[in-house]
Image (tube, rainbow, N blue to C red):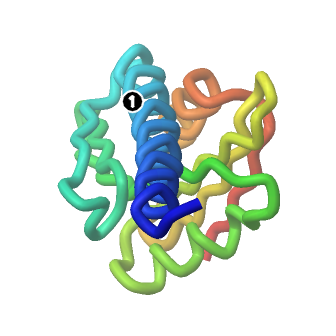
Amino acid sequence: MSQVEAERESRGSLRRAYLKGYRFEQNVRKALENVGFTVFRCAGSKPCDLVAICRDDERIGVILIECKVSEKLNPSVVSQRLYEEYRLPALCVVDRGRTIWEWHATIGPPGLPYRWLSMMRDALGPRYDYKTL
């Protein structure tokens, strides 16, 4: 295999991985929008992949979301890192190639209303964990 062919194959592999991650982000975005969140995609995934905003009569909540397609990733480590860097509620949603996504939330003061956590569970599925700091 020539160097040019190897580079083409490498670019094709990277493109497929990017598209797989992009499609997963879009699925998470649609799921959250369907239960009432307003969701924005961040260019270049900086500082995270998605930002979800939820509003009720008393307050507005912002949640930073990282979406990962991985068999080995620990979502609690990702959400913890994101929370520590920005001091906003953080969520990591992982697609391990199964029908049910896994997700982990790290939530610090002042926390999130239970209703919003319930909405996230409805949107993202029952396999979750969260840590309140």
Which is nearer the eye, 44 or 8? 8
| Quarter of the rendering occupied by the N terminus | bottom right
Q: Secondary structure at mark 1?
A: helix
Residue 112 in view in this figure? no
* Residue 78 percent across, percent down from the top left: 59, 71
Instruction: Name the quadrant of the C terminus.
Output: bottom right
Q: Residue furthest front?
A: 2
- Residue 38 image-quadrant placement: top left
Q: Residue at x 22, y 41 (%)?
A: 40
Find residue 4 and report its horizontal and vertical position in percent.
40, 62
Percent coordinates x, y for residue 107 in the rendering:
54, 65
Q: Is residue 112 above or below residue 102?
A: below
Q: Which residue is mark 1?
A: 26
The image quarter in which residue 106 lies: bottom right
**Residue 73 image offset from top left, x and y in percent:** 73, 64
Judge whether 84 appears above or below 132 on screen.
Answer: below
103 left or right of 97?
left
Furthest-bottom residue in view? 85
Reply above or below: 125 against 92.
above
- State the residue at coordinates (76%, 35%): 97
Does residue 38 appear to the left or right of 88 in the view shown? left
